[in-house]
Image: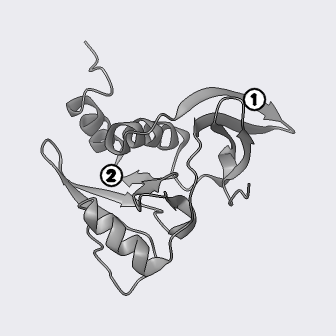
Amino acid sequence: MKGGKEHRVAFLPEVERVLKVADARMLATESLFDYLTDLLLSNHYFDDDIRLEGAYTEGGRLFIVTTQPYISGIHPDWPELRAGLARHQLRDPAPRSLGGNFIFDDELLGEVDVFDLHPNNVIQDASGWLNPIDAHFYFDDRIKRIAALQKLGLLAAKT
């Protein structure tokens, strides 16, 4: 399996899962909090089963270890990606761009911005369904992210 800038990946055939090791310095998010809550949001919106398995340090660097289900398929090209994500009700706000930024409407939150959905972060399975495997979500600031997580029931409010 081929990883990207953020992750080293390996297939765990005995459990049909993919092991991902992320270098915290290479994350596509502004903070570790954003990265970890993106995992919650991916599980919520894309019905993923991403699991935080742990973390370790090596050479003064922090690594985050996750697993997620293995999906057999191909990485779609840009036209297939856009068409497939449109079937998921994701809109491309800049159709001539290859940035991988999309928007969808949520009943509780309104517009939700998803980014990093480029062909290498999406797998098209045998049925033609597109499965995001490394999605990130944009919020204007941490306060808005926390409020969104609380509205969705993914983070308990402080009492």
Most distant residue in the bottom direction: 96
* x, y percent for residue 70: 59, 43
Could you give the CA–CA distance between mark 2 and mark 1, rounded to whole angstroms?
28 Å
- Crowding at label 1, few (<14), some or many (≥20) Cα neighbours within 10 Å? few
Could you say which disc has been placed on residue 56 in the image?
1
* x, y percent for residue 127: 42, 58
- Classify residue 38 by image quadrant: top left
- Classify residue 75 by image quadrant: bottom right
Mark 2 belongs to which amino acid?
Answer: Phe
Could you say which disc has been placed on residue 22 in the image?
none
Marks 2 and 1 close (CB-CB < 8 Å): no
Mark 1 belongs to which amino acid?
Answer: Tyr
Q: Is residue 147 above or below residue 100?
A: above
* x, y percent for residue 8: 74, 49
As drawn, is 85 to the left or to the right of 81?
left
Most distant residue in the left direction: 107
Location of mark 2 (residue) = 139
53 or 148, which is in the foreground? 53
51 or 128, which is in the foreground? 128
